[in-house]
Image (tube, helix red, strand yellow):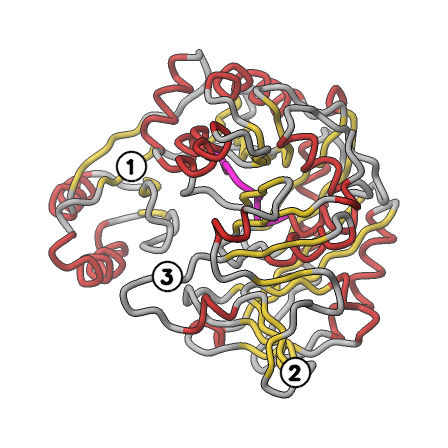
Amino acid sequence: MANTKNKTILVHDSGAFFEIALALADHYKQVLYYVPWESGFPSPDKARVGTEWANGKQLDTFDGKAFKRVPEFFEALKEADIVFFTDCYNGDLMEHLREMGYPVCGSGRGQILELDRWLCKQTFKAAGMDVNPMKRVTGMTALRELLKKEEDRYIKISRYRKLVETFHHETYQLSEAILDKMQHELGPMAETIEFIVEEPIEAIVEEGIDCYTVDGKYPNNTLAGTEVKDRAYYGEIMDYDKLSPGVQRTTNQISPMLKKYGYKGFFSTEVRTTKDKENYLSDMTCRLPMPPSPLYTIMFENLGEIIWGIANGEIIDIKPKYKCGLYVTLYSDFFDSDHQPVWFPKEYRDNVKISYPIKVDGKYTAININGFPEVGSVVVGGNSFEECYKLMEKIAPEVKGYGLKIEVKDCEVAKGEFDKMMGKKS
């Protein structure tokens, strides 16, 4: 195991996982941080993510740490001992770098399990996994015709995450507005998009694992938890063999797939478990999950070693700093269309995680890039839910910003779902 304190890591990021990259400055000699910004007509937004400025000059640090935003990936590659891809969509680049001999932590070819939802479910079916009935159609006209006939369905698309999140179709009358909006946004592309139409799953709990793998092998311990969609997450680090039966079953079933793709990186699963003990792996996340990946920065004492190990084909178990973790989303309707300044006491910096940040003369701002309301999160660790919750109640109200909202009570809902997953009574 190398001493990562003597190593330089190059992080390729979308901007969403900046805080994980920044935390690696505590584990590596130098973090070089790259966010793709190039286009025929570039704007400064993506080129400024992860930069700190003072008196009009860009610094080669962030929060005083050895963290440098770099404008060119391959120039920075010359200095790197290891490359870490936080997101998907660059599988071919990851594989190319591996062929060149670089240690790379990232999903690589395995990203297809997230990016092609139809292929993913057919792969699950071929492996004997529980898969709910579904159909695929191409084009808005075909989608509309199908939804006029069918009710209570979940509509998903592959690859293009910005177009629309999964949405619940109850009746055509109710769905017509979102279909009209999508058709308008797509324009001439409307008849070229593939849609997946899934039948609902009557689940008693949604559970999952937030883990990492090397060729289908897993660590002896991992973080597992439950999410209140887009609001809160509660998880615990536990031994793999202590995971719920549904999570263990599905994670074991996908192991050969991950081995086939040479997957070396982080992933997470969402499993809907029924009263008949069927376990439907509804979606794969072939990247750092959000939530709960910001929790890794405070719960994993050896995060840098874990990433180094993955990139070099070795599984390193988690050294827990805390057993339990809580994550609550910071969100703001203002952030849908404007940059969002965020203020908080300096002593809570490790707990406040900001997506797409810039820091100018000491002020943190989340740069509006995607038009989503999620500004970031507040994360805390402890040795019990009660300890975490008490800390969250203390810190969350101290995070300020125009229109900024955080629902601490959602933590209790997440804990209740966790207890269901583990077969406990809340």
Label 2 secondary element: strand
Quadrant housing residue 205:
top right
Left of 45 or right of it: where is 122?
left
Residue 249 visible, this orientation: yes
Above-or-below relation of 65 to 216: below
Residue annotated with mark 1: 196
Above-or-below relation of 139 to 51: above
Residue 121: x, y in percent? 38, 25
Residue annotated with mark 3: 38
Q: Could you tell me how far apart the alpha carbons at marks 3 and 2 are, in whole angstroms?
A: 25 Å
Q: Could you tell me how far apart the alpha carbons at marks 1 and 2 are, in whole angstroms?
A: 48 Å
Residue 35: x, y in percent? 49, 57
Graded by Cα atoms within 10 Å as few (under 14), some (14 to 19) or many (20 or more), the crowding at tag 3 reads few
- Residue 52 lies in the magenta stretch: no
Residue 53: x, y in percent? 62, 79
Q: Are marks 3 and 1 in contact (CB under 8 Å)?
A: no
Type of the residue with mark 3: Glu
- Residue 291 lies in the magenta stretch: yes
In the picture, the disc for residue 54 is: 2
Viewer-nearest residue: 154 or 89: 89
Q: Compare marks 3 and 2 and give the one earlier in the sequence.
A: 3
Residue drawn at x 26%, y 49% is: 171
Left of 62 or right of it: where is 72?
left
Q: Compare marks 3 and 1 and give the one earlier in the sequence.
A: 3
Q: Could you tell me how far apart the alpha carbons at marks 3 and 1 are, in whole angstroms?
A: 32 Å
